[in-house]
Image (tube, rainbow, N blue to C red):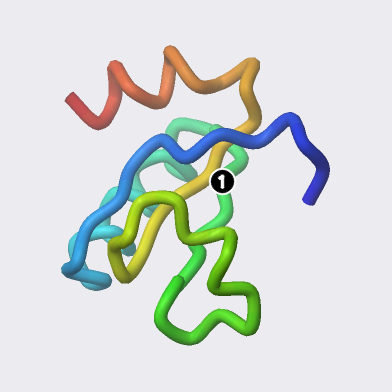
Amino acid sequence: MDNNWKLVYASSDSFEVKVIEAKLKESNIECVFFNHQDSEFPNLNTSKLEAGIYVHEDDFENAKSIID
């Protein structure tokens, strides 16, 4: 993953995050689910939460509007 990805949603409920991920994919937004608890890279956990979704920065605003 390059530096053009932004955390668009994070929660301690990984199931909820997976539901949001499915919504974004249905809207043709490329996204990546990241479980921070299982990560070998704990320094990437800027949210201090368990799970998050990253989208390309070009899709960030559109993704936020879908989530909200």
| Quarter occupied by the C terminus | top left
The residue at 62%/22% (across/down) is 57
Task: Say whether residue 52 is left or right of residue 67.
Answer: right
Q: Position of residue 34 (x, y in %)?
A: 50, 65
- Horizontal side of 25 relative to 16 (left or right) equals right
Residue at the limit of the structure toward the front, as seen here: 43
Of 48 and 16, the residue lying toward us: 48
Residue at 77% x, 36% y is 3
Residue nearest the viewer, comparing 2 with 63: 2
Vertical comparison of 26 with 48: above or below: above
User: How many labels sit on residues?
Assistant: 1
18, above or below 22, in the image: below
In this picture, is 23 found above or below 32? above
Mark 1 nearby-residue class (10 Å; few <14, some 14–19, many ≥20): many
Estimate the x, y position of residue 65 in percent, counting from the top left.
Answer: 29, 17
Near-viewer residue (1 or 22): 1
Tell me the kind of residue under disc 1. Cys
Which residue is at 65% across, 36% downward? 5
Q: Position of residue 60 (x, y in %)?
A: 50, 21
Residue at which label 1 appears = 31
x and y, in percent, of residue 42 in the image:
54, 73
Q: Quadrant of residue 50?
A: bottom left
